[in-house]
Image (cartoon, rainbow, N blue to C red):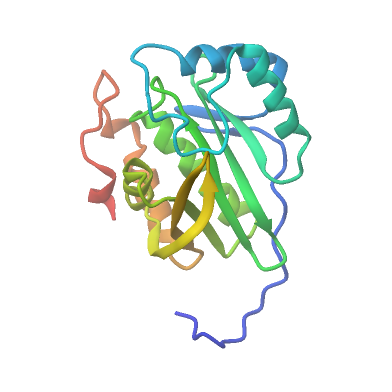
């Protein structure tokens, strides 16, 4: 473990490329508004509805696919965040994810803007999407720290962060105003020195033998840590 003032030999990390990150269950595809907007809009509104999907985000819901596409174009043109469309294997786009608050000079990046539609939630594809983002950040881009932040009232996001191995580091009170509401922000992070253990857990959980014929897990992710 590094001491607070320890000297480290760090030369900087790389900015995420707009390139596909492919796994067994899912591919994170570079954002393509004309191709993805209609399918994403349909996925958002597929039954059963998720009333909390946009609740904690600073944008959405969108009136129609055209409005969503216009928003996606703005994100595609931005340097930060870097968005990906979450595309389950053999299926239509079902979510969004991004890197944001990029600080490659100090090796810090955040995973956020997660829009996991009902079809994606609680599936192996959802877990593999987070694994792919973490693996790319640590193993290929050279980051030292990957963050996860959410509204302290967003219990689903907080549970997800903990399940994926992010350690809670505290709460920043009155850090934002989102859609006219105060937001206290819970901060989580995974560090590079902890990543090998978490990587091994993800990869063991994602093995085909951990799932039955219907794609249900045999053992939870926590069992592999």
Q: Position of residue 21 (x, y in %)?
A: 60, 35
| Residue 90 visible to the viewer | no
Residue found 37% across the figure and 25% down from its top: 51
Q: Residue lying farthest front?
A: 180
The answer, for residue 8, to whether it is visible in the render is yes
Residue 63 percent location from the top left of the image:
58, 15
Q: Position of residue 100 (x, y in %)?
A: 63, 49
When the figure is inspected, residue 208 is found, relative to residue 98, above or below; the finding is above
Quadrant of the rendered image containing residue 219: top left
Q: Residue at x 72, y 56 (%)?
A: 14
Horizontal side of residue 32 vs 62, given as left or right: right
Q: Quadrant of the N terminus?
A: bottom left
Q: Name the quarter where the C terminus is drawn.
A: bottom left
| Quarter where residue 52 is shown | top left
Q: Look at 38% across and 44% down and name the residue there.
A: 157
Relative to 42, residue 80 above or below? below
Q: Residue at x 56, y 88 (%)?
A: 5
State the residue in front, 15 or 103.
103
Image quadrant assignment for residue 60: top right
How far from the left and from the top, in percent, is residue 212? 24, 24
Residue 86 to residue 213: above or below:
below
Instruction: Using the image as rendered, state which of residue 101 and residue 50 is in the foreground.
Output: 50
Q: Is residue 121 left or right of residue 90?
A: left
Number of marks drawn: 0
């Amino acid at each position: 473990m590094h001491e607070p003032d320890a000297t480290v030999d760090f030369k900087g990390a790389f900015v995420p490329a707009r390139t596909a990150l492919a796994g067994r269950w899912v591919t994170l595809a570079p954002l393509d508004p004309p191709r993805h907007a209609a399918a994403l809009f349909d996925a958002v509104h597929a039954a059963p509805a998720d009333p909390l999907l946009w609740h904690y985000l600073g944008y959405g819901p969108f009136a129609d696919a055209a409005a969503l596409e216009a928003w996606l174009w703005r994100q595609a043109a931005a340097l930060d965040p870097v968005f990906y469309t979450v595309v389950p294997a053999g299926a239509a786009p079902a979510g969004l994810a991004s890197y944001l608050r990029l600080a490659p000079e100090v090796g810090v990046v955040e995973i956020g803007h997660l829009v996991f539609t009902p079809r994606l939630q609680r599936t192996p594809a959802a877990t593999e999407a987070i694994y792919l983002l973490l693996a790319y950040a640590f193993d290929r881009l050279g980051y030292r720290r990957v963050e996860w932040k959410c509204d302290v009232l967003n219990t689903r996001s907080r549970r997800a962060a903990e399940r994926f191995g992010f350690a809670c580091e505290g709460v920043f009170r009155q850090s934002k105003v989102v859609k006219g509401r105060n937001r206290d922000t819970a901060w989580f992070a995974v560090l590079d020195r902890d990543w090998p253990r978490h990587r091994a857990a993800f990869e063991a959980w994602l093995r085909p033998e951990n799932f039955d014929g219907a794609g249900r897990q045999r053992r939870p992710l926590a069992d592999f840590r």
